[in-house]
Image (spheres, rainbow, N blue to C red):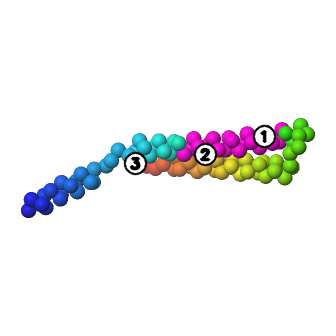
Amino acid sequence: MINGITNISLQSEALQPKNESASTNQSFSNFLKDAVNKVNEAQNESDAMTTKLVNGEDVDLHNVMILSQKASVALQAAIQFRNKGIEAYQEIMRMQI
């Protein structure tokens, strides 16, 4: 009988919510920050290569176009991610309580 009671108390401790929201928020925040930084780096690299090409430096046009498209795709993905986040927020705000 005593073992049954101690098992219940152990189960109630296991059911208590853990304070993982701060670490989850921090990791999501870091994820967003890293994603924005990568998009920014792709844009900067594309701009630098385009500037070199325009200035007449020895740069392969093929590589410039590839970097330009990579930067464009990264930016479009970031915009879609933002749009989906805004749509989700608006949907939550429309919910009736």
The residue that mark 1 highlights is 47
Query: Is 27 on the left-hand or right-hand side of 48?
Result: left
At 13% from the left and 61% from the top, the residue drawn is 4
Mark 3 secondary-structure assignment: loop
Q: Main secondary structure of the magenta part?
A: helix
> Left or right: 84 with respect to 72?
left
Q: Secondary structure at mark 2?
A: helix
Within the magenta stretch, is there residue 47?
A: yes
First in residue order: circle 2 vs circle 3: 2
Q: Amino acid at mark 2?
A: Ala
Nearest to viewer (mark 1 / mark 3) = 1
In x, y percent, where is residue 29? Answer: 51, 42
Q: Quick one: quadrant of the N terminus?
A: bottom left
As drawn, the residue found furthest toward the front would be 58
Is 63 positioned to the left or the right of 93 in the image?
A: right
Q: Amino acid at mark 3?
A: Ile
Mark 1–mark 3 Cα distance, whole angstroms, equals 49 Å
Residue 19 in the image: state x and y as whole percent. 35, 44
Magenta part of the chain: 31-51
Q: Earlier in the sequence, mark 1 or mark 3?
A: 1
Label number found at residue 35? 2
Would residue 3 appear left or right of 59 to someone viewing this image?
A: left
Judged by depth in the image, the label closer to the viewer, 2 or 3, is 2
